[in-house]
Structures are given as C-alpha cells and as structure tokens.
Image (cartoon, rainbow, N blue to C red):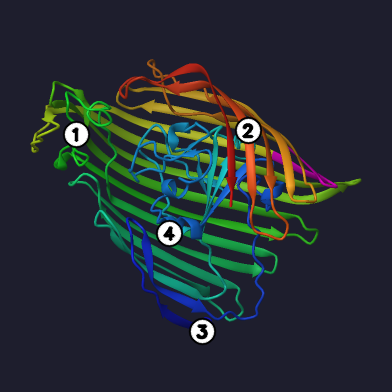
Amino acid sequence: MFATTRMALLIGGAIGGATFPLFAQETTKNDTVIVTSPVQSGATKLATPDIETPQSVSIITRQQFEEQGATSVRQAVSYTPGVYSNQIGASNRFDYIVLRGFSDGSLDNVYLDGLKMMGDTNSHSSLVVDPWFLEDIEVVRGPASVLYGRSSPGGIVSLTSRKPAFDAGGEVKLFAGNNNQRGAAFDVTGPLDDNERVAARLSGMTRYADSQFTPLKEERYALMPSLTWRITDRTRLDLMAYLHRDPQGGSHSGLPYQGTVVPYNGGKISNTFFEGEDDYDKYDRRENMVGYNIEHLFDNGWSVRQKLRYLHTKVTLNQVYAAGWLNETALNRGYSGSGEKMSAIALDNQLDGSVDTGAINHRLLVGIDYQDRSNHTTGYYGAFPPIDAFNPVYGAQPNYITLYSREKHKLRQTGYYLQDQMSWDRWRFTLGGRYDRVSVSNIDKLHDSRSDLDKNNVSTRAALLYLFDNGVAPYLSYSTAFTPTSFADENGNVLEPMKGKQWEAGVKYEPLGGNSQFSAAVYRINQTNIATKEEPTDPYRSIGEIESKGVETGGH
C-alpha cells in the first residue's frame, strides 16, 4: 500500500531563526497515474498560466519560504514586490500584510484554499496558518473584488495548503535558532488503499521562542489532518481540518519615537526594555477550521465545484502599553484587555467550462459565494502607574480597570459573479462582473443599542493582454474594489463601505524553454470613504479619498 521508503539522515545547522531538516524520506514511486484537480490561480480562480494573467502576481514557493526560515506568512512574503510586511515590527501575532499601500485593517486580505480567512478587523480575532502547512503563497496585487467580494484594493494573499499525495512520503524536522527558538514538525502522506482511491496527510508542528522582551514568549502548537477521496475518475473530494493554539503570543507593542529612533533628553531606551507587567500581559489564541472541496468533471469538459469551511476562534488579550512620556525618564502606561469568541462560514460554488463563438474561445466561470461571521467581544481599558524607561521596576498594580464594551459583530455577504476569459489568436481579453449583498451589524449589549448597514455593490474588471511569440506579454487592466467594515462612528453607526478603483499597465516576459519570468507594472489606485481614527481610543470616521501609485518590477 505504501511505497518503499528509505530514511536518510541530514545534518545541518541553524543561523538566526532558520530551521534545518533532521530526517527526510526518499520515495520510490510506482507507475500509477493519479487524476488530480488543476491548480487554481488566486487571480482568476482557474488554472490560468501566469504569463496570460493580466495582473501582477507573485508566487512564493515552499522551497523559498523554507530557505528564508519564515515562521509566519508575513515573513514569507517580505521579499515580494509591492508588499510591506513590517508594519508592527517583529511581532508574529498577526499576519499584517500591506499591499500597494493599502492594509484593509491589515488583517482581512488573506485567503486559504480560495476561501476568505474571515477575521474581524474590528477586534483581535484574526486567524493565521503556520507556513509549515502551506504548499505555496500567491500574492495578487490590485483589486480582486470581482471574484471575492469585500477585499482590499491593494490585493489579496492566497494560501494553498499541503494536500494528500498518492505517493507515500514524509519528513521530520527540528527547529533551532536565536532567541532560544526550538521546536519540531512532521509531515506524512500516502494512499490508504491498494486502488489508490483514498489518500491521507497528517502534518503537525510545535514551536517555542523567547521574544525581544524577556518576560514574553512565543509558543505554538498546530495540527492539520486531510484526506482526498477519488470517488470516481471524474469526482474528487478533499477534506481538511486545522487545529491551532498559541498559548503565548509574544510582543505586540510600541514605544515612542523619541527615545528609540532618536534620543530623548540625551538617552535611548534599551532595545530589550519591556514596558508592561508580566502578570497583566497575555495573548492566547485558539482557532479550529474544518472544510471540504468537492469537484466533478463532466464529459463535455465543464466542471462544477463547491468549497466550504467552518471556523471558530477564541482570543484572550491582556496588555499594558506605553502611552507617551510623563517626564524626563518615566512613561505613562495604559491597559487594554479583551475576550472574544468568533465563528464563521465561508462557501463558494463554481461552474466553469469553455465555449466557442466563431474564432473566439470563451473560458467561462460562474459562481455564487456566501460568508457569515459572528464575533462576540468584551473589552476593558485601564491605567497603570508610570514606569522608568531607563531603570524599570516591575510589580505595579493597576490604578483601575473598567469594562467599556460588550458587543456582537455580525457580517453576511452573498455574491454572484461571472468571468469570461476570451482567447483569439494571441489576444487575451478578460471581462468580469460581480454583484454583492452585504449586511453588517454592531450590537452593543452594554448600552442595549445596535446599528445596521445593508449595502449592494457591483464590482467589475476588464483587461487586455497580447502574447508575443518571443515570450513577451504586455497588458492593460481596470478593476474595482469595495471594503465594508464593522467600524462605527461616534454615534455608533456603521461606516459606509470603502471603495476603490485601479488602472494598471504592465509587461511580462517568460524566456522560451526556461522557468524564469520577469515583470514590470505601473498602477494607480484611488480609494474613498477611508475608515480612520486619530487616537486608539477615538471612534472611527470616514475621510475623503487617498491615492496610491507606483512602479513594480519582479522576477524569478
């Protein structure tokens, strides 16, 4: 049932946070041909070659982010054009990823296996997937609302999980590095029957590390079981689950510009200074996901598929943070705490196939998707005695801690979309449209009030590309985006959705007979109804319009 394997011992070292393999398996493959689902592009939801995609796309392979020693998606995409991933410094608590200058709350632009991760940007409930469980990461720059609905105009990050293989294999790794980093990971996969109709995979990992600030640690445990069942030669079912626990989430704080970047009264704060209190600093996240993807290929070449995922998260946060200088040596300190429970469902139904009208081939995609999220949050704020930033003494008790919010955030989205990828000779023309109905509710249980917002939106995309026979492909595209949020203004009313539009022109080059690709693009994005606030404790408000424009180049 399992192919013959031979264990090979690999000896390596670790520098910094990099990891090294301890054991790897060499696999003897048999001659059975397994029919698998085509790899879908995050930019088109279809198996479209990158050279024919009229949009800026970067693929970070598993080999690349393993060589980087990435311990988060944020780290894995840090060398990608148009990406800023260090918005919060070295913290790995969330995958803050800013694309083309737009953060969308920095948390709401990540997708796993084609479905939105469903985090709530108006809370601390944000999901992450450890890179150990990923096959590759695709960064799609520019609006993607025409296929995904609510999303950042800067783009999306599409994660692909490791799937079961019908060739048996596996590996075990040990992690070691600076900051006392240590841990282990394993992965095993193979067929479960002699007819190779069913295959399974089980991956798991654990990691522990000190942070830059002595009392705070990073600790993670995660497990991903998955199963593939080839029900028939034309029908395939994939099942997966992801169980994740971060008992300790490390640091997620900041210090004043004066005293860190530049001196304050002639001195600088130590880079190991901890402004909090060990007994009052905690971040504990539990996240569980289960889902499936089922696909059937008809005799005429058309296919239908359905993807569904249910998730549940629980987050506990306590944090003492610096709140500006009190005098020449002391920093004011505040307190923030929350308890959150979130559940969500994401569903996507797709039908795709090809038809010809004269000399033009149409690759059509029709879809209906649905998202439903509910997040229960309880928030506290308070104050702590000041702390000497140059000679800290710990053990202080809070001046006060007060309950300030008990809310329920609800979001529902139903989207209907159509995409037509037309081919005529060497011309590629893409048209897409999507209609969304979105409902957002904020229920204030503390003050017995609520605010609701129901919106409809139409998103569009049009793009033109020409494939020269020497591997050069220039393109021009226009696309739109919209981003509803659960942010409320000073009167408790949910803000209007943010909207964006982009023009992009670029060129891709794929040398004949090679695996390399080079690209360059110029773009301009405009976004309106920007949700912002001046101070962390201020209510949100909408401002007018912002513009992001730039030039990107890349290659691999």
Cα–Cα gap, marks 1 and 4: 36 Å
**Callout 2–callout 1 Cβ contact below 8 Å:** no
**Callout 3–callout 4 Cβ contact below 8 Å:** no
Q: Name which residue type carries label 4.
A: Trp
* Crowding at mark 4 (Cα within 10 Å: few <14, some 14-19, many 20+): many
**Which residue is identified by label 1?**
269
**Residue 25 placed where, x, y %?**
46, 76
Nearest to N terminus: mark 2 or mark 1: 1
Q: What element carries label 3?
A: loop
Q: What element carries label 4?
A: helix
Whether residue 263 sits left or right of residue 65 in the image: it is left
Query: Is residue 214 shown in magenta?
Result: no
Q: Which mark is residue 132?
A: 4
- Foreground disc of the pair 1, 4: 1
Q: Is mark 1 on a helix, strand or loop?
A: loop
Whether residue 398 sits left or right of residue 104 in the image: it is left
Q: Name which residue type carries label 2.
A: Val
Q: Is residue 337 above or below residue 452?
A: below
Which of 334 and 223 lies nearest the eye of the viewer?
334
- Foreground disc of the pair 1, 3: 1
Q: Residue 4 carries which label?
A: 3
Tally the marks: 4
- Foreground disc of the pair 3, 2: 2
Q: What stretch is highlighted in magenta?
A: 418-431
* Crowding at mark 1 (Cα within 10 Å: few <14, some 14-19, many 20+): many
Cα–Cα gap, marks 2 and 1: 41 Å
Q: Is residue 439 above or below residue 176?
A: above
- Where does the N terminus fall, quadrant-wise? bottom right
Q: Name which residue type carries label 1.
A: Ile
